Amino acid sequence: MRRTSSRSKSRTPVLWRNLTQYVGTVLEALGQDPRLAPAPVLERQADQRSDEWVDRYRAQAEREGLPT
Protein backbone atom coordinates (compact mmCIF):
# COMPACT_ATOMS: atom_id res chain seq x y z
CA MET A 1 0.00 0.00 0.00
CA ARG A 2 1.45 3.36 -1.04
CA ARG A 3 1.29 6.30 1.33
CA THR A 4 0.20 9.56 -0.20
CA SER A 5 2.35 12.65 -0.09
CA SER A 6 2.18 14.81 3.04
CA ARG A 7 1.02 17.61 0.76
CA SER A 8 -1.96 15.57 -0.42
CA LYS A 9 -5.44 16.14 0.98
CA SER A 10 -6.11 12.46 1.72
CA ARG A 11 -3.76 10.26 3.70
CA THR A 12 -3.68 6.59 4.38
CA PRO A 13 -4.68 6.06 8.03
CA VAL A 14 -1.89 4.75 10.20
CA LEU A 15 -2.28 3.23 13.63
CA TRP A 16 0.41 5.22 15.40
CA ARG A 17 -1.43 8.48 14.71
CA ASN A 18 -4.59 7.57 16.63
CA LEU A 19 -3.90 4.24 18.32
CA THR A 20 -6.03 5.04 21.38
CA GLN A 21 -8.94 6.02 19.14
CA TYR A 22 -8.63 2.86 17.02
CA VAL A 23 -8.43 0.62 20.09
CA GLY A 24 -11.44 2.45 21.57
CA THR A 25 -13.41 1.84 18.38
CA VAL A 26 -12.57 -1.87 18.48
CA LEU A 27 -13.48 -2.09 22.16
CA GLU A 28 -16.79 -0.38 21.47
CA ALA A 29 -17.51 -2.79 18.61
CA LEU A 30 -16.90 -5.63 21.06
CA GLY A 31 -19.40 -4.15 23.50
CA GLN A 32 -16.75 -2.75 25.85
CA ASP A 33 -16.21 0.75 27.18
CA PRO A 34 -14.01 2.61 24.65
CA ARG A 35 -12.51 4.60 27.54
CA LEU A 36 -10.63 1.42 28.48
CA ALA A 37 -8.30 2.02 25.54
CA PRO A 38 -4.80 2.74 26.86
CA ALA A 39 -3.21 6.14 26.46
CA PRO A 40 -0.44 6.38 23.85
CA VAL A 41 2.94 5.18 25.09
CA LEU A 42 4.93 6.24 22.04
CA GLU A 43 5.36 9.68 20.59
CA ARG A 44 6.12 10.24 16.93
CA GLN A 45 9.67 11.51 16.51
CA ALA A 46 9.55 12.24 12.79
CA ASP A 47 9.00 15.62 11.21
CA GLN A 48 8.25 16.93 7.72
CA ARG A 49 11.81 16.20 6.64
CA SER A 50 11.39 12.55 7.64
CA ASP A 51 8.07 12.39 5.78
CA GLU A 52 9.73 13.76 2.65
CA TRP A 53 12.49 11.15 2.94
CA VAL A 54 9.90 8.38 3.23
CA ASP A 55 8.00 9.73 0.22
CA ARG A 56 11.20 9.80 -1.86
CA TYR A 57 12.17 6.28 -0.77
CA ARG A 58 8.75 4.85 -1.58
CA ALA A 59 8.71 6.48 -5.01
CA GLN A 60 12.21 5.13 -5.75
CA ALA A 61 11.34 1.71 -4.33
CA GLU A 62 8.28 1.49 -6.56
CA ARG A 63 10.37 2.32 -9.65
CA GLU A 64 13.13 -0.13 -8.74
CA GLY A 65 10.99 -2.93 -7.34
CA LEU A 66 12.27 -2.58 -3.77
CA PRO A 67 10.16 -3.44 -0.71
CA THR A 68 8.02 -0.75 0.87
Image (cartoon, rainbow, N blue to C red):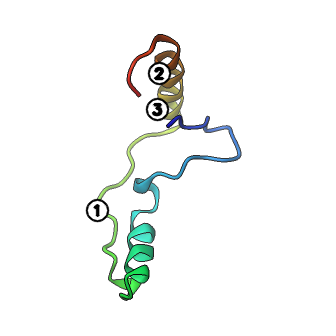
Crowding near pointer 2: few (<14 within 10 Å), some, many (20+)?
A: some
Q: CA distance from mark 3 to mark 2?
A: 11 Å
Identify the residue shown where x is 46% and y is 32%.
50
**Do the residues bearing badges 3 and 2 touch, measured as CB atoms within 8 Å?**
no
Taking the image as shown, residue 35 lies to the left or right of residue 54, namely: left
Identify the residue shown where x is 39% and y is 49%.
44
Q: Secondary structure at mark 1?
A: loop
Q: Earlier in the sequence, mark 1 or mark 3?
A: 1
Given residues 30 and 15, the one toward you in this image is 30
Crowding near pointer 3: few (<14 within 10 Å), some, many (20+)?
A: few
Q: Secondary structure at mark 3?
A: helix
Q: CA distance from mark 2 to mark 1?
A: 27 Å
Query: Residue reaching furthest top?
Result: 64
Q: Secondary structure at mark 2?
A: helix
Q: Earlier in the sequence, mark 3 or mark 2?
A: 3
Disc tally is 3
* Residue beneath disc 2: 57
Q: In the displayed structure, would residue 47 be above or below residue 42?
A: above
**Do the residues bearing badges 1 and 3 touch, measured as CB atoms within 8 Å?**
no
* Residue beneath disc 1: 41
Q: Amino acid at mark 3?
A: Ser
Q: In the displayed structure, would residue 35 be above or below residue 50?
A: below
Q: Quadrant for residue 65, please give it.
A: top left
Tag on residue 50? 3
**Disc number lying in front (2 or 1):** 2
Q: Amino acid at mark 1?
A: Val
Identify the residue shown where x is 47% and y is 11%.
64
Query: Residue reaching furthest right?
Result: 9
**Do the residues bearing badges 2 and 1 touch, measured as CB atoms within 8 Å?**
no
Quadrant placement of the C terminus: top left
Identify the residue shown where x is 60% and y is 37%.
4
x and y, in percent, of residue 22 in the image: 43, 67
